[in-house]
Amino acid sequence: MPLYSYRCKACSHEFEALVQPSDVPVCVSCGGGELEKLVSRPASEGRSRDLLQRARTQAAREGHFSNYNPSDRPLR
């Protein structure tokens, strides 16, 4: 599942979301559906681990674990 950056047109909140092609994301702040997809900069070599951890943390909050090994999933 790719990680995309968005800006909400209603409240100008910027956020990242793991989005499947069939999903339509909504703003995590106001719930608005009018989002602008932002151009992401490539991650530098040293930041890749941090980006992966943030993506996994967000996936855990949203309940998306289909692309992780069972050992990567947090214990509940």
Image (spheres, rainbow, N blue to C red):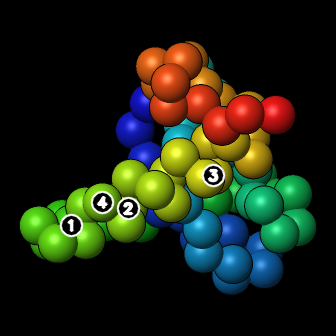
**Left or right of residue 36: residue 11:** right
Element type at marker 4?
Answer: helix
Residue 19 on image: x %, y %: 54, 37
The image quadrant where one finds the C terminus is top right
Is 24 above or below relative to 52? above
Q: Residues within 10 Å of mark 3 (few under 14, many from 20)?
A: some
Identify residue for label 2: 51
Do residues under tags 4 and 1 come within 8 Å of each other at their CB atoms?
no
Out of 4 and 34, give the one closest to the viewer. 4
Q: Which residue is mark 3?
A: 58
Q: Which residue is mark 1?
A: 43
Instruction: Tell me, yes or no, whether the two marked residues, 4 and 2, touch with CB atoms within 8 Å.
Output: yes
> Residue at position x 50%, y 51% from top?
55
- The x, y position of residue 38, in whole percent, is 41, 66
First in sequence: mark 4 vs mark 3: 4
Residue ID for mark 4 = 49
Give the Cα separation between the discs numbered 4 and 2. 5 Å
Left or right, residue 7 beside residue 48: right
Q: Is residue 43 above or below residue 69?
A: below
Residue at the image position 25 percent from the left and 61 percent from the top: 48
Distance in Å between CA atoms under marks 4 and 3: 14 Å
Where residue 26 appears, x then y in whole percent? Answer: 75, 50
Can you say whether 76 is above or below 69 in the image?
below
Mark 4 in CB contact with mark 3 (< 8 angstroms)? no
Q: Earlier in the sequence, mark 3 or mark 2?
A: 2
Q: Earlier in the sequence, mark 3 or mark 1?
A: 1
Counting residues from the start of the chain, the first of labels 4 and 1 encountered is 1
3D distance between C-alphas at marks 3 and 1: 18 Å
Mark 4 or 3: in front is: 4
